[in-house]
Amino acid sequence: MSPLLRALLLISASGAPASRLWSAIESEGLPPEALWQEGPPLWRRLGCSQSVIDSLRTLCESSWPEEEAERADGLGVRLVAFRDDSWPKDLSGQPDSPRLLYVAGEWPMRGPFVSVVGTRRCSQYGSRAAFEIGRAVADAGGTVVSGGAAGIDRAAHEGCLSVGGASTAVLGTGVDVAYPRGHEPLFERLAGGEGTLLSEYPLGSGPKQWRFPERNRIIASFARPLVVVEAPVRSGAMITARLALELGREVWAVPGRINEGTCEGSNRLIYDGATPLVSIPDFISLTFNRQLSLFCDLPPDDRNTAVLSEKEQRILCLLEKSGDRTVDNLAVEGKMTPADVFSSLAALMAAGQVFQAGPGRWSSTPK
């Protein structure tokens, strides 16, 4: 076992904030083996709590890392470190990125990646939307990334798998722990080669409330883009959306009923400028650059306008003449339905012709 893998395993099992502790080790320019060679003086200097120090002392004196690697091998689980050639680029370069992944199933994962998140207590409409989005992503050659929860997560995975696509579940437990109950068949399919199970937690790790928001940063990192389907204001999906925005990822949201609490967060995202997903074909076309490729060889001044639809040209003309406008303004002035305005704005934003000017407002010039 390499010193790097041993150090990462020790940190992951110690209860320490793994990313923060490893970043501290790197900032001091220390080799991995310094973790056990320097021992408690180093751990204290790096800011470890007494409980973490006690845990590291016990672990370093044991053969736990070697035993964990043996258990993983017996289960067909890969241990992938951040310096391995197969480490995903989307998980590199961020201070809080994981440094070690437990992987069951297909590896390396196949992109492009579309992350789909939402509430466990979704409506039939939300479940159907997530299923159809997952299926469309797979049909387009993409990979769905989501959690492993009931509701939106499961529907998105099943939609992807229904047409032979590859789906990835990022877990808040060990990859060998099926949570929630009843998801064993889904996880077995993913781990069996139809997709991937990912976790940064040791084998046997059970569900802890704090782990689920923590793993959301991995889902956000893979998001190219992120789709939020039915999410309350206070929810893991909204945490993932915030993280995705902080990483500069594009966020889409499926419009939901205004009188449903489970849609309040996703509707709020649209109000604040997320792209409304009102047409799955349009979403797929824009996400996978099929529409943009039509004009990629045109001179800069001729790009986009040559392939814009009549409605898109109408919206662009209104914005150029009138400055920033709301969807309602554009619908009235352009004599279009709000759904058509949303769809046109999504296309224009993806083409770089329209920009968010503020909550619920758009402009033809960057603000």
Image: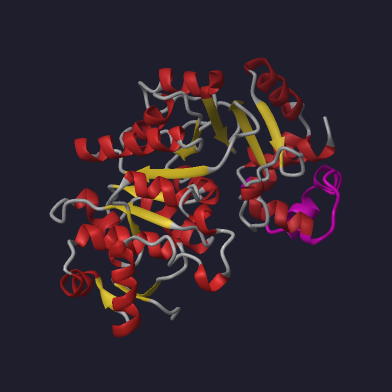
Which image quarter: residue 95?
Answer: bottom right
Residue 318 at what x, y percent from top left?
28, 77
Residue 170 seen in the current view: no
Which quadrant would the C terminus be assigned to in this image?
bottom left
Residue at (38% x, 59% y) in the render: 347
Which residue shows up at 64% across the image and 57% down it? Answer: 94
Residue plotted at (32% across, 76% down): 317
Give the percent coordinates (x, y) of residue 333: 18, 75
Q: Is residue 286 above or below residue 344?
A: above
- Can residue 48 be found in the magenta stretch? yes
Q: Position of residue 165 (x, y in %)?
A: 48, 28
The quarter of the image holding the N terminus is top right
| Magenta residues, start to end | 27-51
Residue 324 visible in rendering: yes
Which residue is nearer to you in this view: 79 or 329?
Answer: 329
Q: Is residue 144 or residue 353 the one in the foreground?
A: 353
